[in-house]
Image: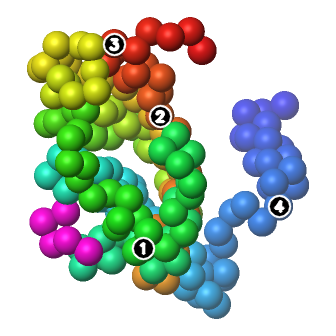
Amino acid sequence: MRSSAIITAALAALATAAPNKWIHVSDVEADDSAYDCLCEDEAWDIARRWLAIFDQEGLEGGKDELATIVAEDLASYDETFGEPTLTLDELWTAIQPLANPTTEDVSYDVNFLLHTCDQIAVNWRYTAVTTGYNSTAPKGTPVELTGTDILRIDLEDRLITNATSNGDWILQSRLLGNVALL
């Protein structure tokens, strides 16, 4: 069997095994929504803006800037810190700085991300230093951990409608000097 015949047979098998996974020119002409999916640069921008919400610097534009990142009816699930936040207002309240934070100089950076048409999975790194408050670690001790957020994006307005977060906060607890067995 010639290599061109093998390639043709393989492509036919893929097309049969995965129907409706290909974008056909005729589909695009009839419905240009195929172009509405997130592109790579847009996914990176959304991920970085999402993580900036939680940085030490926060959002320079306040709640108005938050409204350019997340939808009014955002559902954010990170049960590490309590119940889910189910609106933009609840998230705004949750991200307000604490009076006596345990860490400072907090920053989040994207390690890598994967995305589909309307979802982003972002692996991030959290870095900070201890303040000495609520910690047995000396003030200024570096703290690092990683986590992953899965974000669903509304393709109409490009706002985050759902966020599920998971971080290695047990590691942070240990770095702060809490050594209790779990």
Alpha carbon separation for disc pair 1 and 4: 38 Å
Highlighted magenta segment, given as a residue range: 59-63
In front: label 3 or label 2: 3
Q: Amino acid at mark 2?
A: Gly
Query: Tag 3, which secondary structure?
Result: loop
Give the mark nearest the N terminus, 1 or 3. 1
Residue, far bottom: 30
Residue at image position (50%, 11%) is: 180
Mark 1 or mark 3, which is nearer to you? 3
Rendered-image quadrant of the N terminus: top right
Q: Are marks 1 and 3 in contact (CB under 8 Å)?
A: no
Residue 158 image-quadrant placement: bottom left
Q: CA separation, marks 1 and 2?
A: 21 Å
What residue is pinned by disc 1? 88
Badge 4 element: loop
Residue 177, disc = 3
According to the picture, the residue beneath numbered tag 2 turns out to be: 167
Please report whichever mark, 3 or 2, sits nearer to the chain's N-terminal start. Answer: 2
How far apart marks 2 and 4 lie (CA) works out to 36 Å
* Labels 3 & 2 near each other (Cβ < 8 A): no
Relative horizontal placement of residue 87, taking residue 96 as reference (left or right): right
Residue depicted at x 47% and y 34% = 167
Q: Which of the two discs, 2 and 4, sits closer to the camera?
A: 2
Q: Is residue 76 above or below residue 121?
A: below
Label ID, residue 64: none
Which comes sooner in the sequence, label 3 or label 4? 4
